[in-house]
């Protein structure tokens, strides 16, 4: 693939040369002012409509540029917060006077994600949410990415202070592979994970021009994995957003469950952009964040063993205690079951003692009966370690971005762009991962024209010093004493003490009473009454040499384990890469604007590289590469006096491991006045992730396997294991493998967006999604007789993706109302509902819907109170309780759907002041103002409050 990238460079060169042409130039210039104050406006974008040529106004509100576009043409004038204007230019003119009116009417935004072409947000054929520059400035959230949680229908799972995962319309997860995040057209996923790591390697808030969220299936235009939605972010062009801007944000984070409840928070950003002339422009961005992370301190016992239920407990209430946020205590062994086979080994000291007592009773007590009296039928687990003892909570994030733009003419622009990010955060997957010094780079070359683009980019991932925290906890115990030695030592100590007491009391009582029945009863009672003492003594003996947090021996062992790759160590190694080629052409002008038509295609390759620690290997000992390609076309036509727009699109995608997939979409929008009614039929599909295909990794809860036969067949699971659900039901049923296919969805949606009166903008949608070949987690059990692994004392659990046999049906609706109260005050609310209508008759699968039925937001704000420059904004948020299913949850808890995430509500607020003389905005804000602790997913941290002060300087800030 690297060779292919090298070969494509000549293609770019040829296009560059063809772009040069000597044509006549028309000079355009003028001044732009605020219509009310008559003050010059700085940074207003002025461009030729339908072309790439344009500029911005300077400190005096003046603009000037030359264009090769023949007159007459139209210039588009726009600025966030002002009404967009289009002005006809019939000849060269340098004194155009333009007055921009402040935007006072909602719903004037333009979006591109819904159809890949510009259109009014009101007339979008599908549901869409938008965050512009003004929204970013006004949000009370600590950053724009956290502000996504305030959008209608958007779910956010917080795993770290700088790592959140976004989901829509159900199936939330900590690494969501059903939502695609694009930054400047580049898929922002980490290639080895197949999901975006939040905004750790993303875009700086200072460089973000706008963000669009498209809930629902979008594969028809955006390809694989856009099943539940798209997040589209665009950065600022250095031609249109110039000068120096900077932001300093400082504050404190508070959470009562942390060792140090109140800790500092800092976030610094810089951006500089310069247009050298009408041809060349560049920009540089830098962002650095530092904080002490939120902590996961859930110590509830999730083992469900020894007669316990899910709830608060410890080892004194359950010998097989398995704490949610405790690692190293996941493995358990039943003591009676483990010792019973020894009865067949006469030379074993325990067996010899039991046989001696049995013989002394003349066979009244059998060896198995004696063992049952002196050894309880209980499971035992080792003591684990709290996450805070072994995780990396020092959260750091550095992002760097640079871009060089060159305009060949009015129609073609070259963009060379590079983005690099490095960070430390926590991520909850099948384990709790400390993503320490994780880094990722994205590098792009793009030719962008007025009616096409040709884009090539690569994503290079490096997991750095990342490690699996849960696995680390287990391996610390194994380093101190292997479980193959620890459990026998525990069991032999316990049984030895119990047998000695039993024999002594039996003999003494028999001598005193001469009654065997009384002697046996007294011996049993005396021995079992001492069980707590025996357990304490047995654990003390087995725990000799246990590594204690804070000691030099503990620290040495931890560093050694973190330095060795999985599965022998805890280091998570992933240096996978993605290579992507993509092009799109708009044929609308070629068709004389009678219909809108676009066509496009892409090719992608994943090059897996975990150095053998994460992915399965082929027969030659190498990790796999995965190739896929796709192509699409879309046609749209306005009819009935332009009141109705019909849009149809079709896409075909092929992954080398699966059959090709067709994704059609059909939508219609009817506009009458300021009301817009829409209906759409959308389809989507999800190519299983690289990990879903090829992972082969042992975790604390189970061994994770890819769904491909080349991986599963190595463990001989088909016909040689039982489904976990059948085992829990007491009727073990053999697992039989079947063909594995990409997940598909068909969504029917109806919606309305328009004005109710003069002041209320309403947006409503209702949908139903039918999933076929739904991919859900399946867990199977291999008994010792089946896995025949002498290193494992008990059963083995395997977890892998598999298709649900029947359709899974979800449905939902969403409603938002934005009300202009007057005097710049706005009041908004949104509510969304998502539910599983039919789970497809799931028996042996985990659906992992992971979404509350209801969630709502209420917002009130004023960006400029009475023209004073003071602004205020507050957001109240609520969501219901829901069940969370994932591979980090104890599998029995998972299967029985006991992993409940409680409901919660929060209040965020900010007050801001524009300091015109300093060209700055001062903002004081707080998130979760009243400090109500909450969590968004199983084993995720408890989120507290954040209080901050920020000052943002912008050289082009208007008065």
Image: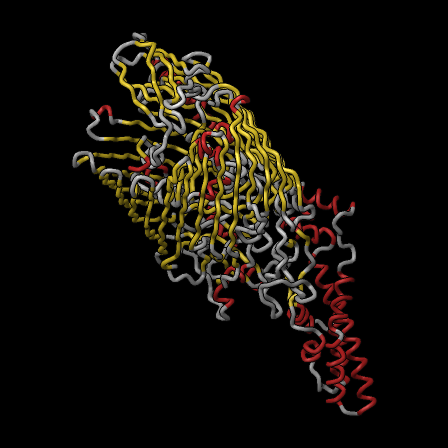
User: In the image, what residue occupies the spot 61% across and 34% down?
Assistant: 250
Q: Nearer the viewer, residue 862 or 522?
A: 862
Task: Say if 739 sits above or below 874 in the image.
Answer: below
The image shows residue 701 at horizontal and vertical percentages of 58, 55
Quarter of the figure with the N terminus: top left
The single residue placed furthest to the bottom in the displayed view is: 514
Q: Nearer the viewer, residue 845 or 621?
A: 845
Task: Say if 64 sits above or below 895 in the image.
Answer: above
Q: Nearer the viewer, residue 839 or 381?
A: 839
User: In the image, what residue occupies the spot 39% across and 25% down?
Assistant: 79
- The image quadrant that residue 440 belongs to is top right
The image shows residue 917 at horizontal and vertical percentages of 53, 21
The single residue placed furthest to the front in the displayed view is: 866
The image shows residue 897 at horizontal and vertical percentages of 49, 61
- Does any portion of residue 300 appear in the rendered image? yes
- The image quadrant that residue 755 belongs to is top left
The image shows residue 183 at horizontal and vertical percentages of 45, 32
- Left or right: 346, with 803 as reference point: right
Q: Nearer the viewer, residue 772 or 337?
A: 772
Task: Say if 146 sits above or below 353 in the image.
Answer: above
- Does any portion of residue 465 appear in the rendered image? no
- Left or right: 232, with 289 as reference point: left
């Amino acid at each position: 693939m690297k060779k292919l990238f090298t070969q494509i460079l000549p293609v770019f060169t040829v296009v560059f040369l063809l772009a040069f042409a000597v044509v006549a130039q028309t000079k355009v210039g003028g001044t732009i002012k605020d219509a009310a104050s008559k003050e010059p406006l700085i940074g207003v974008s002025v461009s030729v409509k339908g072309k790439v040529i344009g500029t911005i106004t300077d400190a005096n509100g003046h603009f000037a540029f030359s264009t090769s576009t023949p007159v007459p043409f139209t210039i588009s004038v726009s600025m966030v917060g002002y009404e967009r204007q289009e002005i006809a230019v019939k000849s060269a003119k340098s004194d155009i006077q333009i007055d921009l009116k402040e935007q006072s009417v909602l719903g004037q935004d333009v979006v591109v994600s819904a159809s890949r072409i510009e259109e009014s947000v009101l007339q979008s054929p599908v549901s869409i949410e938008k965050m512009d520059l003004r929204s970013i400035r006004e949000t009370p959230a600590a950053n724009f990415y956290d502000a996504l949680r305030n959008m209608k229908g958007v779910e956010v799972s917080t795993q770290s202070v700088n790592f959140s995962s976004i989901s829509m319309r159900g199936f939330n997860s900590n690494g969501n592979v059903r939502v695609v995040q694009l930054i400047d057209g580049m898929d922002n996923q980490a290639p080895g994970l197949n999901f975006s790591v939040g905004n750790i390697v993303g875009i700086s808030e200072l460089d973000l021009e706008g963000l669009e969220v498209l809930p629902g299936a979008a594969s028809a235009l955006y390809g694989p994995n856009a099943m539940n939605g798209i997040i589209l972010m665009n950065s600022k062009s250095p031609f249109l957003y110039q000068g120096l801007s900077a932001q300093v944000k400082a504050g404190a984070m508070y959470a009562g469950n942390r060792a140090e409840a109140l800790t500092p928070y800092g976030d610094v950003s810089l951006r500089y952009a310069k247009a050298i002339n009408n041809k060349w422009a560049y920009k540089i961005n830098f962002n650095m964040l530092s904080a002490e992370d939120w902590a996961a301190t859930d110590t509830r016992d999730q083992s469900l063993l020894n007669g316990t239920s899910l709830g608060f407990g410890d080892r004194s209430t359950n010998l097989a205690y398995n704490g949610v946020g405790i690692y190293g205590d996941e493995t358990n062994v039943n003591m009676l079951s483990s010792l019973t086979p020894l009865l067949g080994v006469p030379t074993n000291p325990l067996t010899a003692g039991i046989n001696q007592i049995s013989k002394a009773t003349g066979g009244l007590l059998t060896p198995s009966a004696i063992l049952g009296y002196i050894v309880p039928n209980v499971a035992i687990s080792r003591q684990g370690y709290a996450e805070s003892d072994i995780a990396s909570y020092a959260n750091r994030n550095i992002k760097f971005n640079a871009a060089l733009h060159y305009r060949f003419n009015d129609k073609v622009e070259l963009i060379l762009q590079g983005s690099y990010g490095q960070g430390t955060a926590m991520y909850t997957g099948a384990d709790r991962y400390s993503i320490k010094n994780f880094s990722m780079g994205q590098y792009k070359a793009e030719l962008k024209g007025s009616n096409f683009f040709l884009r090539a980019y690569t994503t290079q991932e490096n997991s750095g010093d990342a490690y699996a925290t849960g696995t680390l906890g287990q391996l610390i115990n194994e380093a101190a004493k292997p479980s193959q030695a620890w459990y026998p030592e525990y069991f032999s100590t316990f049984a030895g003490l119990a047998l000695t007491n039993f024999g002594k009391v039996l003999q003494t009582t028999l001598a005193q009473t001469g009654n065997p029945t009384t002697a046996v009863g007294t011996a049993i009672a005396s021995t079992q009454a001492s069980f707590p003492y025996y357990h304490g003594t047995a654990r003390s003996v087995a725990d000799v040499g246990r590594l204690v947090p804070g000691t030099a021996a503990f620290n040495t062992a931890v560093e050694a384990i973190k330095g060795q790759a999985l599965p022998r160590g805890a280091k998570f190694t992933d240096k996978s890469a993605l290579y992507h080629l993509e092009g799109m052409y708009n044929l609308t002008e070629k068709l004389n604007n009678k219909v809108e038509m676009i066509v496009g295609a892409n090719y992608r390759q994943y090059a897996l590289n975990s150095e053998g620690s994460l992915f399965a290997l082929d027969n030659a000992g190498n990790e796999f590469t995965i190739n896929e390609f796709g192509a699409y076309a879309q046609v749209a036509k306005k009819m009935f006096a332009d009141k109705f727009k019909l849009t149809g699109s079709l896409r075909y995608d092929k992954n080398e491991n699966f059959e090709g997939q067709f994704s059609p979409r059909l939508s219609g929008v009817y506009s009458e006045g300021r009301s817009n009614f829409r209906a759409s039929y959308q389809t989507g599909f999800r190519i299983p992730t690289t990990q879903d295909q090829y992972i082969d990794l042992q975790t604390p809860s189970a061994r994770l396997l890819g769904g491909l036969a080349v991986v599963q067949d190595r463990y001989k699971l088909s016909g040689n294991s039982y489904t976990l659900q059948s085992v829990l039901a007491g009727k073990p049923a053999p697992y039989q493998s079947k063909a594995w296919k990409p997940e598909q969805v068909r969504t029917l949606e109806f919606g309305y967006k328009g004005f109710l009166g003069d002041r209320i903008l309403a947006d409503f949608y209702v949908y139903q999604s039918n999933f076929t070949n739904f991919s859900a987690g399946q867990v199977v059990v291999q008994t010792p007789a089946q896995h025949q692994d002498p290193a494992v004392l008990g059963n083995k659990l395997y977890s892998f993706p598999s298709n649900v046999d029947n359709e899974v049906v979800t449905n939902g609706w969403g409603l938002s109302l934005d009300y202009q109260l007057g005097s710049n005050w706005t009041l908004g609310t949104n509510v969304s509902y998502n539910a599983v209508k039919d789970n497809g008759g799931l028996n042996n699968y985990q659906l992992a819907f992971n979404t509350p039925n209801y969630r709502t937001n209420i917002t009130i704000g004023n960006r400029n109170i009475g023209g004073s420059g003071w602004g205020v904004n507050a957001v109240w948020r609520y969501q219901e309780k829901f069940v969370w299913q994932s591979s980090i949850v104890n599998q029995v808890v998972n299967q029985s759907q006991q992993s409940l995430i409680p409901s919660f509500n929060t209040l965020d607020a900010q007050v801001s002041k524009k300091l015109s003389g300093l060209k700055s905005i001062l903002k004081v804000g707080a998130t979760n103002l009243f400090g109500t602790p909450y969590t968004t997913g199983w084993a995720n941290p408890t989120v507290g409050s954040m209080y901050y002060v920020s000052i943002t300087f912008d050289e082009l800030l208007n008065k």
